[in-house]
Image (spheres, rainbow, N blue to C red):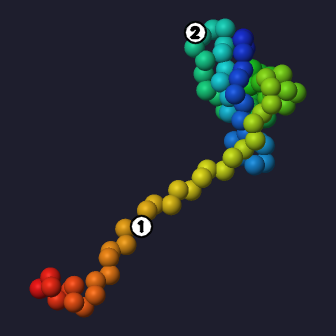
Amino acid sequence: FEIESVRDCKWQDAEHTMFDCWVKYAQFDEEHPSTIIENDKHEHIQTIWKNGLDGKYGEIKEYEPPQQEEAPIDVPKTLTLEELLKTL
């Protein structure tokens, strides 16, 4: 594949063994999201890896672990004895 452009590189792990990016190949009209790893068997992926590390596509943004969102807890209201007796 002929690489026209690569943008928005971002590490996908803290160890920096792979990064995601958008790649525009001459053979296609649209960009493609791609995960790039060092030991990929395809020459165009190896080229993107080397050029990415060399800074040819700009800085590779640092890995950010996913944020764990806490689900809101629905705590039932505690009733007093008087309130409880009124419900009977």
Q: Position of residue 33 (x, y in %)?
A: 61, 26
Q: Which residue is found at the position 61% from the left and 50% from the top?
A: 66
Looking at the rendering, which quadrant does residue 54 occupy? top right
Q: Which residue is mark 2?
A: 29
Q: Quadrant of the N terminus?
A: top right
Give the amino acid at mark 2.
Answer: Asp
Q: Position of residue 3 (x, y in %)?
A: 73, 14
User: What is the crowding at mark 1: few (fewer than 14 residues within 10 Å), some, or many (at least 20)?
Assistant: few
Looking at the rendering, which quadrant does residue 36 occupy? top right
Q: Which residue is mark 1?
A: 73
Q: Is residue 84 above or below residue 42?
A: below
Q: Give the numbered dot on residue 53.
A: none
Q: Is residue 27 left or right of residue 73?
A: right
Q: Which residue is found at the position 32% from the left and 76% from the top?
A: 77
User: What is the crowding at mark 2: few (fewer than 14 residues within 10 Å), some, or many (at least 20)?
Assistant: few
Q: Is residue 84 left or right of residue 10?
A: left
User: Which tag, 1 or 2, sits closer to the chain's start?
Assistant: 2
Give the amino acid at mark 1.
Answer: Ile
Question: Which residue is more in the foreground, 34 or 82?
Answer: 82
Looking at the rendering, which quadrant does residue 61 occupy? top right
Question: Which residue is more in the foreground, 44 or 77?
Answer: 77
Q: Quadrant of the C terminus?
A: bottom left
Question: Which residue is more in the foreground, 19 or 59?
Answer: 59
Q: Is residue 88 visible?
A: yes
Q: Viewer-nearest of labels 1 and 2?
A: 1
Q: Position of residue 68 (x, y in %)?
A: 56, 56
Looking at the rendered structure, the secondary structure element under dot 1 is loop
Q: Position of residue 18 (x, y in %)?
A: 73, 38
